[in-house]
């Protein structure tokens, strides 16, 4: 979930651009007159299959340089593709495919990595496909955002892999982003692969090897995709999944994140659940006070940096009518427990090897649930490597225990992905 601070490493490489003054991108191939028009799905959606490409346009990367073999790190295309929401209804999701400039020197066809982003926020302006054109944005007074996923994406591109990055359901496109919704995120990840493999004139093949890659929210989305791949997208050659700090159990994560700098992601979660399960509105109205309702409305239009600055370190007991933490309130509501259970990851079997990383002192996503998830997968016969970063607790609630393992684990994660593409047998500590 946490990742904004990672962006500090690239601040010196770019210019802060006020979001309100950002220039529109080139018109889309379907007649869009600007970036905002690109994100409006056709209504109704045309008949088709999940992964069908609905719209494309060039996407000028903010961090790119001319190179002998072409623009570095590659040529980017903004895409809109057909997917499926958590209620099995067709929806439109956006994202970005980057065709790498680097050569592929490994065996077989050039691989594709689908990058499931960590927490970006819930406002449409936070969509990675928008942020890749700016990297850093600032909207006064507190709307600061860094697209930190360029670090992972550019590293993967430098190894010659194609990279496709999903925006997820409702992030960029109309409607609430269904944050940490297991099924919607898994579908968006898998359909991003299908869409990228359909694009003409790319360096990847239409049926080459694929790996899923994500940390925090992205780790949960990648893990959910690994579990659903065999059922939802059996034709994909998914050879491995990196799932860092996956919020596999939303109930445990809710309890842990409450009162930290990322308290606001609880608002993202509730807003997303209200979109996918509108019957929850009565439960919210009965249990959330006016301050809580104001918070839900506030974070619905924010990127994560602004949410940290406005809601961070608050506790959910401020937002409930009884003055109890939200986790306690939800504990006694059967429908809420049912929905949390539906979104639990670990009830299915991943279709390929998995590397899961987690810090022992993670103050955002509990380390214990990563252990439980790995154990559940091992019990189903999966090949799982659990890597636990022994990081001491540093200012609990600051997100440091969540951020540091992400940075320290980058090399291990990308080497593990490389080994899958090179056919090296996957390790397991089940």
Image (cartoon, rainbow, N blue to C red):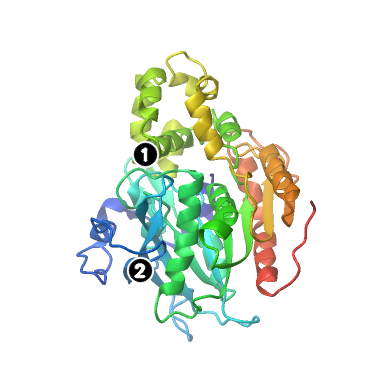
Q: How far apart are marks 1 and 2 (CA)?
A: 29 Å
Count of numbered marks: 2
- Residue 280 in the figure: left or right of residue 101: left
Q: Which residue is drawn at 39% across and 44% down?
A: 122
Secondary element under disc 2, as helix, strand or loop, is: loop
Q: Nearer the viewer, mark 1 or mark 2?
A: 1
- Residue 100 in the figure: left or right of residue 59: right
Q: Position of residue 293 (x, y in %)?
A: 35, 26
Q: Position of residue 56 (x, y in %)?
A: 32, 69
Residue topped by disc 1: 275
Q: Where is residue 210 in the image (x, y as percent from the top left)?
A: 57, 68
- Residue 45 in the figure: left or right of residue 379: left
Q: Examine the rendering and report whether any part of residue 211 can be seen.
A: yes
Residue topped by disc 2: 59
In the rendered image, the vertical position of residue 352 relative to residue 285, given as above or below: below
- Residue 371 in the figure: left or right of residue 214: right
Between residue 161 and residue 375, name the one nearer to us: 375
In the rendered image, the vertical position of residue 107 relative to residue 17, given as above or below: below
């Amino acid at each position: 979930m946490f990742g904004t601070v990672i962006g500090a490493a690239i601040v010196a490489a770019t210019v802060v651009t006020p979001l309100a003054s950002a220039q529109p991108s080139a018109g889309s191939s379907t007649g869009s007159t600007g970036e905002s028009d690109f994100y409006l799905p056709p209504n109704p959606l045309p008949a088709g299959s999940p992964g069908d490409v609905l719209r494309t346009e060039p996407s000028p990367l903010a961090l790119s340089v001319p190179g002998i073999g072409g623009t570095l790190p590659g040529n980017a295309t903004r895409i809109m593709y057909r997917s499926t929401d958590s209620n099995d209804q067709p929806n439109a999701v956006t994202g970005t495919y980057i065709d790498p400039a680097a050569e592929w020197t490994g065996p077989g066809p050039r691989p594709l990595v689908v990058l499931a982003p960590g927490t970006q926020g819930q406002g449409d302006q936070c969509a990675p496909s928008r942020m890749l054109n700016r990297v850093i944005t600032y909207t006064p007074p507190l709307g600061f955002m860094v697209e930190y996923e360029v670090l992972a994406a550019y590293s993967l591109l430098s190894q010659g892999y194609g990279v496709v990055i999903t925006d997820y359901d409702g992030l960029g496109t109309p409607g609430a982003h269904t944050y940490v919704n297991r099924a919607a995120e898994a579908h968006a990840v898998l359909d991003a692969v299908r869409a990228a493999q359909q694009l003409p004139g790319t360096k990847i093949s239409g049926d080459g090897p694929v790996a899923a890659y994500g940390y925090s929210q992205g780790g949960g989305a990648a893990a959910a995709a690994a579990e659903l791949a065999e059922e939802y997208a059996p034709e994909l050659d998914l050879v491995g999944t990196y799932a860092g700090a996956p919020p596999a159990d939303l109930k445990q994560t809710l309890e842990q994140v409450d009162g930290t700098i990322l308290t606001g992601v609880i608002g993202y979660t509730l807003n997303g659940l209200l979109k996918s399960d509108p019957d929850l509105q009565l439960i919210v109205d009965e249990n959330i006070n006016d301050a809580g309702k104001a918070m839900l409305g506030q974070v619905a239009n924010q990127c994560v940096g602004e949410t940290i600055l406005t809601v961070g370190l608050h506790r959910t007991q401020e937002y409930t009518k009884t003055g109890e933490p939200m986790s306690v309130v939800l504990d006694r509501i059967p429908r809420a427990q049912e929905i949390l259970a539906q979104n639990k990851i670990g009830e299915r079997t991943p279709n390929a090897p998995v590397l899961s990383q987690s810090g022992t002192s993670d103050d955002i996503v509990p380390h214990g649930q990563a252990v439980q998830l790995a154990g559940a997968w091992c019990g189903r016969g999966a090949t799982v490597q659990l890597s636990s970063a022994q990081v001491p607790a540093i200012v609990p609630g600051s997100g440091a225990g969540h951020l540091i393992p992400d940075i320290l684990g980058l090399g291990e994660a990308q080497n593990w992905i490389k080994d899958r593409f090179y056919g090296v047998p996957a390790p397991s500590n089940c």
